[in-house]
Amino acid sequence: MPRSTRKRASSRPKSLSGFAGRVSGVLVFLNSWQGVFAAMGVVALITIVVALFMPFGKGPQLIRPVAPVPSVNSPDFLRLVSNVLTAPVESASEPQILENGDGFLHAFLTDVDGAKQSIDFMAYIWEDGKFSDTLLAHLTRKAKAGVPVRIALDGYGSLHAPWTKFAEFERAGGKTAIFHSLMPLPWAMTRDHKRNHRRAIVIDGRVAYTGGVAVADTWLGNARNPDEWRDMMFRVDGSMAAHLQAAFAEVWELETGEILNGPRFYPAGDPAAARNPARQLRYIPFVSSPSVDTFGMQNLVLLSLGAGQHSIRIVTPYFLPDRSMRQLLCAKARAHVDVRVLVPNDHNDARWVRYASQNSYEELLRCGVRISEYQPTFIHTKLMVVDGSWSLIGSANMDNRSRKLNEEVVLGISDAAFAGKLAKVIAGDEAHAKVITLAQWQQRSVFARALEWLALASVQQY
């Protein structure tokens, strides 16, 4: 027998005996008290992960109105939404539409530079780069000038924030707070999966911004190429600014204990209403803090869709319709309502979410919903327009996380002129989109179908 063969043969029993010894050691450990406690810990960890990340026991499987929803043009619709959400019906001037980073940043920095009383900035994502440096420079300058400046960020969304650069801002007097800072503590695991996704940026309590933009260089530019994302922000004043201030203040108090009150945050009077009292539109502000027992954002979305009688336009970067939403969209399409959904294509910052989203395409296409994918770059816009007169704007996506997990802020606006402007923007984006047909979709590969199913398995976190 060759020497190498003899060596391998002679080493085999030692290897087997070593393995048997290790197995025996594991069994002895498991039979000990330490082993029992270790096993209990593993079971507890698995239970927490399943409870937080899997779609089990997260409320009713189907949510639906028990009676027909009034048309969005009916006074009964606003009354219904107000009652269901326990949110007021108010009046304000029309929001200013700002498209992409170029449209937003100039207007916002102008307001920042003119601030005299307070600057409160809340966004989901903050990453290092040119956008961050520019914004921090302006905010630090105002802090040095004695204007109180507060920045509220999300623990997950700010993972790539340049904290060393925030040091100068804080030395100048600026303050920062982090929502659910992802501390690796057992008692924090039950809440850290909930994120603060609100966009609420307020200047002197009088002017505010909401929409989809956050702080990263992908939000710079004008959506001219895949490196410049497509998005929108809205500049508001009057009572709308007050509600966005409240959305900021709620999270700020949670993290710092400070109640933001007084005229620097909530100034008296509405100069916009005094300037143009005839052009006041009606709206419902909704600040969402969902729990396992209440899904207000879900109700707002379903009531808005249920009211559609002619057309429904949805633009969203993350489209994860649950059973309730799919059934309602299909019912509307079958009733000859023109239902259109505009979503991203391969230009996407969350491929796994896109795969999960595509799992619903065939069902929706079969019942007549039109789905198209925006081609030039990643579209991060969040809009809904129903029957050309009811609009939803703000921070919420059409996914499970925004409807049932995230802190969000949305304005439901009842005004045909404003809705018409948004519909025109959507039509312009649809001109750069590819329509998905049912015949084309049914030809996708088995591998693509498998990816959809695997992605959908963890849909609770989308």
Image (cartoon, grey):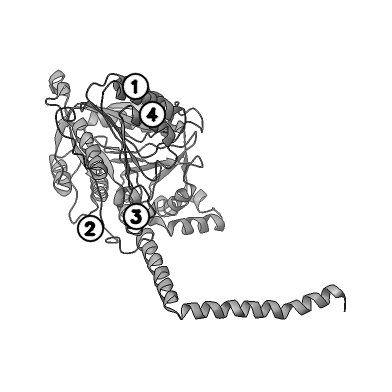
In the image shown, does 386 or 232 lie closer to the viewer? Answer: 232
Q: Which is in the foreground here, disc 2 or disc 4? A: 4
Image spot of residue 140 (x, y percent): 35, 25
- From mark 3 to mark 2, how far is it between C-alphas? 17 Å
Instruction: Give whichever of discs 1 and 3 has the lower sequence position.
Output: 1
Q: Is residue 249 visible?
A: yes
Above or below, 453 relative to 230: below
Instruction: Give whichever of discs 1 and 4 has the lower sequence position.
Output: 1
Image spot of residue 104 (x, y percent): 36, 26
Looking at the rendered structure, the kind of residue marked 2 is Asp
Looking at the rendered structure, the kind of residue marked 4 is Glu
Could you tell whether 166 is left or right of 2 in the image?
left
- From mark 4 to mark 3, how far is it between C-alphas? 45 Å
Residue shown at 26% from the left, 24% from the top:
147
Structural crowding at the residue carrying mark 1, measured as other residues with C-alpha within 10 Å and reported as few (<14), some (14–19) or many (≥20) = some
Instruction: Give whichever of discs 4 and 3 has the lower sequence position.
Output: 4
Q: Which mark is residue 293?
A: 2
* Quadrant of res 49: bottom left
User: Is the Cβ of the residue at disc 1 closer than 8 Å to that at disc 2?
Assistant: no
Q: Is residue 431 visible?
A: no
Q: Secondary structure at mark 2?
A: loop
| Residue highlighted by disc 4 | 168
Q: Secondary structure at mark 1?
A: helix
In the image shown, does 160 or 459 lie closer to the viewer? Answer: 160
